[in-house]
Amino acid sequence: MSYDRSVSADPHELQPETVWHLQMPQIRFGRDSIRELGFQLSDLGVKEGAHGLVVTDDVLSEIGHVDRVVDRLEKAGFAATIWDGAEREPSIENVEGCLSFVRDETEDGYDFYLGVGGGSCLDVAKTTRAVIANGGEILDYVVQPTGEGKALTESGPPLVLLPTTAGTGAEISPVAILSVEEKDVKEGISSNHVRADAAVLDPTLTTTLPAEITAKTAMDALGHAIEGYTTHPHDSLLRPSDPETRPVYAGRTELTEMFSEKAISLLSGNVRRAVHNGDDLEARSAMLKGALFGAIAGLTAGASLCHAMAYPVGNEYHTYHGETIAVLTPASTLGYNAANDPERFARIARMLGANAEGLGTRESADRAREEYVRLQRDLNVVPSGLAELADVTESEVDELARRTVESQQRLLRVNPRPVTEEDVAEIYRDALYNWENE
C-alpha cells in the first residue's frame, strides 16, 4: 500500500498546507448549565413559541434527564416533541426511523433540534437535522464508496447537544458515525454542516452514568487527546486546491496540542475517582472538561490508527466504541506509533503520571503504554484485550486488517507512521492481550 501524506490535495499538487482552521459550536459549560438552555436557544435566534425535537434514547427518558430538558424548554416558552428511539452504535436504519418520524409529524421539519445522551443519540440528532435540511436520503451524504459522498450545503435550524457521557466528543464533532449493516461497515457523514450550533455541558447530567460506561467513554476521550497530540502537524500535509475541500481532520497545531495536554492530565487524573464514586461532581466535571478538550484536539487535528482499527471491530463484534478504543490504544497509538516521535510519547508518559526518571527517551516513551495499561487495570472494568472483549482470535486478525485498510483511509492518512495491511494485522495480534488475566 502506498502512503500519501495528503489528506486533501490532488495528486499533482505538492504545496504544503499553510493555513489551519478551527470551528466550534457555542459552548456552555458548568454545573447546572442546563438551566440556561432557554437562553442558549434564544441566543441562536429561536423565537418564543418555537417547536423543537428532542432526540434521545429510552433509558434517558426513564431516568429523568429528558424531563429536566423538556421542563427547561417549557419554562422558556418553547414546545418540544420527544423521539427516544436512538440505539447504541446507530445504524442507517435507526436514523431513518427518526427521519420518518420528523417527516410524518411536520411539513418542513422542526424549528430547532436537541440531542440528549451519549454519542449515539447525538449522532442521530446531527444526521437527522442535516438530512432534513438538505433533502434526500442518508446514503446520499455518506462518504464514498459506501454512499454517494454528496456535499452538504445547508446546516438547517439550530441544533443544541447535551452530552450525558464524558467521552465521544460528538457534541462538537463535525462527523456523525453510522453503521451500514448490509455492508458490515461503519461510515461517516463529515461536514461542518453536521456540527451542532451549540453544546451545553452540564456535569450533573453525567452522574447517573454507570461505572463501566464511565470508564469506557473516558478511554475514548483519552484516545482523542492522545491521537490528536501525535498525529501529523498540519503543515506537513498538503494544501487543498479549494478551501472548501479542506478536511475536518487537518493535522495538529499549537492550539490543539495545548488542549491535548490539558485533556490527558484531566482525564487520567480524575477517571479513577469518577469510576469509583459516580457522585463525585468535582471529578465528573473534570472528566467532562477533559473530554471536551480532548475532542477539540483530536477531532480537529484528527483521530488516526486506533480509531481506524476500532470501526471494523465494532461493526463485526458489536462492541462499544469506547471499550474498543481502550483495548486497541496500547498496541496502536502507544505501541506502533511511539517509534515515530519518542520524545513526544515520553511527554505523554509524564502526563499520564509515569515516573521515567533516569530513563532514555525511547524507554520513557514505552512507559506511556505501561502507564495507560496500569490505569485500565486500576479501573477494573476495561477488557484486557480483544480476546476478552469479543473472543477475537489470531485467525481473525487478517480479515480485520483488510477491512481497516480498505475502509478507513481518511483516518490512516493522518496517522503519523505509515501502515501496511501487514502492519495492521500485527497490531491487532498485539492487542489480543494487553495483560494476562489471573
Image: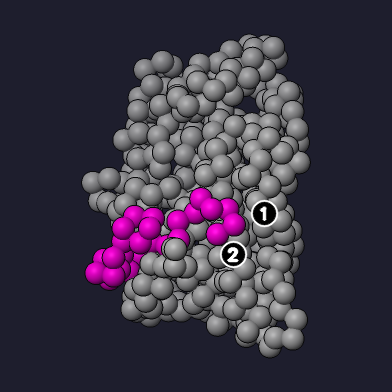
Q: Residues within 10 Å of mark 2 (few under 14, many from 20)?
A: some
Q: Quadrant of residue 52?
A: top right
x, y (%) of residue 103? 38, 21
Q: Nearer the viewer, residue 275 or 199?
A: 275
> Is residue 8 in the magenta section?
no
The amino acid type of the residue labelled 1 equals: Leu
Number of the front mark, 2 or 1: 2
Considering only vertical position in the picture, is 211 above or below 380?
Answer: above
Q: Is residue 184 or residue 338 the one in the foreground? A: 338
Q: Is residue 52 above or below residue 161?
A: above
| Residue indicated by mark 1 | 267
Q: Which residue is mark 2?
A: 374
The answer for how far apart the CA atoms under marks 2 and 1 are is 14 Å
At 30% across and 53% down in the image, what residue appears?
A: 316
The first of marks 2 and 1 along the sequence is: 1
The segment highlighted magenta reads 377-406
Q: In terms of secondary structure, where does tag 1 sit?
A: helix
Q: Quadrant of the N terminus?
A: bottom left
Residue 76 in view (yes/no): yes
- The residue shown at (35%, 40%) is 91
336 left or right, relative to 234: left
Q: Position of residue 98 (x, y in %)?
A: 40, 27
What residue is rendered at 76% in x and 41% in y?
A: 282
Asked whether residue 399 is drawn in magenta, I would say yes
Image coordinates for residue 428, horizontal then vertical, percent = 38, 69
Residue furthest front as drawn? 438
Q: Is residue 90 above or below residue 362?
A: above
